[in-house]
Amino acid sequence: MLSPKSGILSIKPYVGGESQLANVDRIIRLAANESALGPSPLAMAACSDIASLLHRYPDGGSDALRSGLAETFNVDPAKIVCGAGSDELIALLVKAYAGEGDELLYSEHGFLMYKISALACGATPIAAPESNLRTDCQAMLDHVTDKTKLVFLANPNNPTGSYLSQGELEDFHSKLPADVILVIDAAYAEYATASDYEPGIDLVNKSDNVVMLRTFSKAFGLAALRLGWAYSSPEITDILHRVRGPFNVSAVSQAVGVEALKDKAHFNETIRLNNKLLPEFVDFINAIGLKAVPSQGNFVMVDFGKSAVEADAFLRSKGILTRAIAAYGLPNYLRVGIGTEEEMELVKAAFKELAQ
Ligand SMILES: Cc1ncc(COP(=O)(O)O)c(C=O)c1O
């Protein structure tokens, strides 16, 4: 019998947010934190324009895309590495820096891919407890050992929606050993509204051991493309280039990504909609006697105070797909993505029925 490297058989394969339901007329998909508005028309046009060039290899350095990102986010293009989704960049970082005998630290309700990527490389995943559904920096520091190679922090976090302020993050970083890499996974940065939030660019600019990860899957509405980017020191950037595939970002992704960055109006509308509908949904949930957890993302956790299995089944019967998050250690909650205005009216009606 062929056996894989140690750790691999301990992986519980990642189960993505569902998209199908039998026996319902209409499905409202709120299980994968996708964009409610969808892709920009400019991005869609770029997708068809590139069709006649599908026989050509992509630009291995994603140069035009890195320039667009540098201009949009005011960062140094030489310190950007693009990837097939931030998932790929998470895996590459772990592959490059951790193996057998090393530890990868994350917070209790952190994104599941950190643990999966650690196990895939034979490293040991270590989860530090959270307090009140929020990363506890002191608990994280207490779990750093001389084996710790990487610390992953989603900010804002999925699925909790909680965040660390720029001050908290800087303080946490200053207490980490210099030879530990801090990965700030800012997949939901574009949605964050807190005035003391910063996605990690400042910290990358002044440190050698920090990586910020970003994605086109959320606020840019391009999850199907698989496109993300890492911003880090020249040293870490060099390492990521060594371990990535030569053409890890498809030509389609690069062309579409460049155009999506140009469509500021579409991006602004995506954010405006979330800024309106998320607080409205939170207020609604609290008003009907359930509890919504404040969120800086494009999703909200609803606390049922008991197992969410029945609520999930009820919502499914109405065609509404939310995310059960027992796999994150949160069996009493459902994570609800923010949909369009019309979708949220239907979702609220279903929750109202549920709460009666
Ligand atoms: C915190 C976090 N990081 C990374 C990802 C992966 O994003 P991508 O689609 O860029 O691989 C997700 C996806 O849901 C996420 O929630």
Image (cartoon, rainbow, N blue to C red):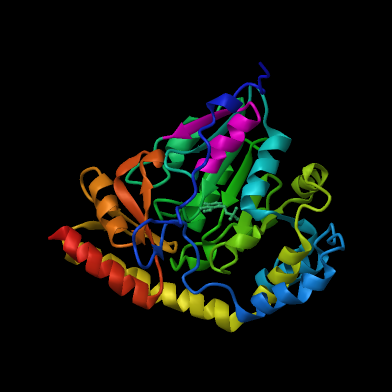
Tell me if residue 265 comes above or below residue 139 in the rendering. Answer: below
Q: Is residue 193 left or right of residue 308?
A: right
Image quarter for residue 329?
top left
Q: Residue, x 23% and y 63% (percent of image)?
A: 351
Residue at the extreme front of the image, as rendered:
23
Question: Image quadrant for the C terminus?
Answer: bottom left
For residue 116: magenta?
yes
Question: Image quadrant for the N terminus?
Answer: top right
Q: Is residue 135 left or right of residue 100?
A: left
Residue at the extreme bottom of the image, as rendered:
265
Q: Residue, x 62% and y 48% (percent of image)?
A: 87
Residue at the extreme top of the image, as rendered:
1
Q: Residue, x 50% and y 42% (percent of image)?
A: 112
Query: Could you tell me residue 322's position as x and y percent?
Result: 37, 56
Q: Which residues are magenta?
A: 112-128
Q: Nearer the viewer, residue 307 or 108?
A: 307
Residue at the extreme left of the image, as rendered:
356
Query: Could you tell me residue 17's position as x and y percent?
Result: 46, 52
| Numbered marks: total | 0
Query: Could you tell me residue 46's position as x and y percent?
Result: 72, 76
Q: Is residue 274 left or right of residue 224?
A: left
Tell me if residue 151 comes above or below residue 85 in the rendering. Answer: above
Q: Is residue 65 visible?
A: yes
Q: Nearer the viewer, residue 349 or 236?
A: 349
For residue 129: magenta?
no
Q: Is residue 303 visible?
A: no
Query: Could you tell me residue 5's position as x and y percent?
Result: 67, 23
